[in-house]
Amino acid sequence: MPFTSKIERQTDYSDFPSSIPIVIDNGASYFRIGWAGESEPRVVFRNIVQRPRHKTTGETVTIVGDHDPALLKYFDCTRSGPRSAFDSDVVYQFEIMEYILDFAFDRLGANGSEIDHPILITECVCNPVQSRSKMAELLFETYGVPSVAFGVDAAFSYKYNQQLGVCDKDGLAICPGFSTTHVIPVGLSNRGNSVKNQISIDRCLFDFQFVDGEPVYKGSCRTNVGGYHITDYLKQLLSLKFPQHMAKLTWEKVEDLKMEHCYIAPDYFLEAQLFQKGTKEAEDKTRCWQLPWVPPPTEEPPSEEEIARKAAIKERQGQRLREMAEAKRSSRINELENQLHGLDFLLQQLEQVEENDIPSFLATTGYVSKQEIEASISKATQSLRKAKGEQAEIEEPSTGEKYPLIHIPDHMLSLEQLKEKKRQIFLKTTTEGRQRAKQKRAEEGLERERKNQQDEERRLENPELYLEQMRAKYKELSEKVEQRKRLKTNGGHTNGNNPSGGVGRGERLNAAQRERMRLLTTAAFDRGKGEDTFGAKDEDWQLYKLMSKDNDDDEDGLDADEVELTRLSSRLQASLFIFEVDPTFVPKQEVVPSQSAPELPRIRPLTKEDFQILLGVERFRCPEILFSPNWLGIDHVGLDEMTGVSIRRLPYKDVDLEEKLTSSILLTGGSCLFPGISERLEAGIRMIRPCGAPIKVVRALDPIFDAWRGAAMYAADMQFPEQTFSKIDYYEKGEDWLRRYQFLYTL
């Protein structure tokens, strides 16, 4: 489990005299600060800075370290994400570093900007002199620190565990950190000039490959892979596996999942095969993270009282609708009866009018003839019987009664009546055309039934001969239809550019289309001769009728062929033919339409399993990049091969020394907390070392805090002030002196 940050403000800053150093473990992931000689740091927080804007006031605020999600909702963080002062374990953003140091000193309890305590601050191996110089300048100029000392965090952790007996004096310190991994040889017994008892600033200028008990930086090795890359890789894999839960997979949560569930496999490929086969052991190793999920409410069946209440409401609503319908029907009946009485009275008056006065009388009533009045009476009577619900058959009115105006001359009609006459003519023509089409479809259906009956008789007489004839006819019609379609859509021009031998446009046209093209060409040619007199004669307008596409008789033949082809296909596809006559028949997709569309997938309700994040192969796949950085495109060696590279980089060769180094390998840093990393590293080192070489890999007592504890132990020593350099030394000797400065770890 990741540890909890401690950022409460301390109140005992004034209790420490100015001679007590302040110890800072400036890691790329977490910042730790405390007093020399203590066993725990006072303040611990994430080494990041975020500067969002307030949504209401627009004011920019600075948030250092961990933030409270409940408070962050009041700020706009879209344009300002978390920023770090590090790049591959090297501090390069000193503006951010200043925010972090301000927050750290304030949490430690410092009231003013002046810090009157010596400072021991950690850095990475072989830190560039520019970064070290900028850090010294920031501490001296901004905070007024009297003296500063720089040390390597992995070396402090190794020397601290050496004091506790965890590791030997000579060995290797392997530190898989947040963004990088380092291997440092520490301690070279009986090599060169040993000056244990002389510790001074001048000693820092010696070549430390000959100093007993010190790190050998010339033999160190680094790989740009660490815990950051493992977390990022795990976040990518989970986002691809569960894209519907990407909002839940925050960096902090993925970091927690990594520290809780990830482990190093003893043999990656054997472990991957377990999950590939889906064995019981793989199921046991799978971990589940259950996201918040609220089951949908179960609908209980309504009680009898509820059913009775809803039925009563429905009955009242139905009764109200029935009453409204009855009132509307009664009103309609009264309206139609009044209309019939008026029409009967009008007809009686018309009978009493003389023959000569009938047109003038009808002009006042709005009717044209007696037949129109009788047709209105018949229509109103029919509507009245329908409204009353009578089932008596009503005689179909004749054409003259239905359309009384079509036989009356136009000069006897008004403008409104002329419009009504045109409408009646249109309705009559449409009705007759519809009846003819209906009759034609009925005749076609009877014709198909007759042909099917004849085919059935022929099939029963001789099934084999019938099948052969049907196949031949189906093949002939298919080729004919395909040829016509090909002539319509394909057929290149015969102008020399079509070597395939296709037909030209004129050969693709049927007779009616060729005649239409001839008429268009002739009309265009005649208009170009002289004066345009087209339309002067009535027969000129017959040209449009001849050029109309409705006269394309060849289309009917094409439709008939397609209809016949469809009928043959249906006959061959019938169940009787499939199982008895031709079970191997497959219709062509171009002619026979496809079957019904596939059924759409049904949407199932979400369950508890849909809100689970399963960690299977990801548990050991992500930390494996420590041993295989090439998976991320980083062309570096793995953690086990780094030890061999570090030993080969030593300035001299000694078998006994190499055996001493590999017999005490210390793992420190936050990324060495994965279970199984010690066993896997030991097995990998045995593959590159001689057979029988002593190899021992141990883990630090506390890989996260041992670097700070080792630095606090060294800062509390009486000889620590001799290894610091003051502000005056910095101003006098400058950056070149910092280039040769090295901290001595031998007490």
Image (spheres, helix red, strand yellow):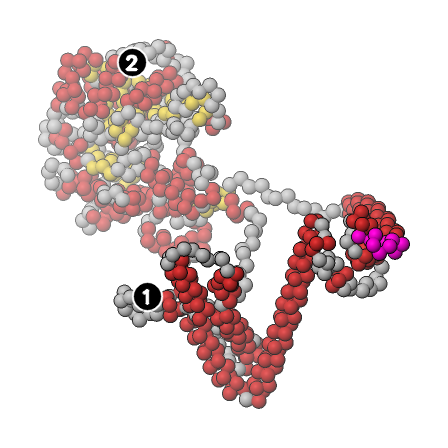
Up/down of 516 relative to 221, above or below: below
Q: Is residue 343 left or right of residue 6?
A: right
Q: Is residue 456 left or right of residue 18?
A: right
Provide the residue designation for mark 2. 143
Closer to viewer: mark 1 or mark 2 = 1
Quick check: can you spot residue 747? no
At 15% from the left edge and 13% from the top edge, which residue is drawn?
732
Quarter assignment of residue 179: top left
Up/down of 449 relative to 60, above or below: below
Magenta span: 350-359
Q: Position of residue 232 (x, y in %)?
A: 36, 39
Q: Quadrant of the N terminus?
A: top left
Under mark 2, the amino acid is Tyr
- Whether 388 is among the magenta residues is no
Up/down of 37 relative to 125, above or below: above
Q: CA distance from mark 1 to mark 2?
A: 90 Å
- Residue 493's disc is 1
At 26% from the left edge and 17% from the top edge, which residue is drawn?
138
- Looking at the picture, tell me which residue is in the foreground, 210 or 240: 240
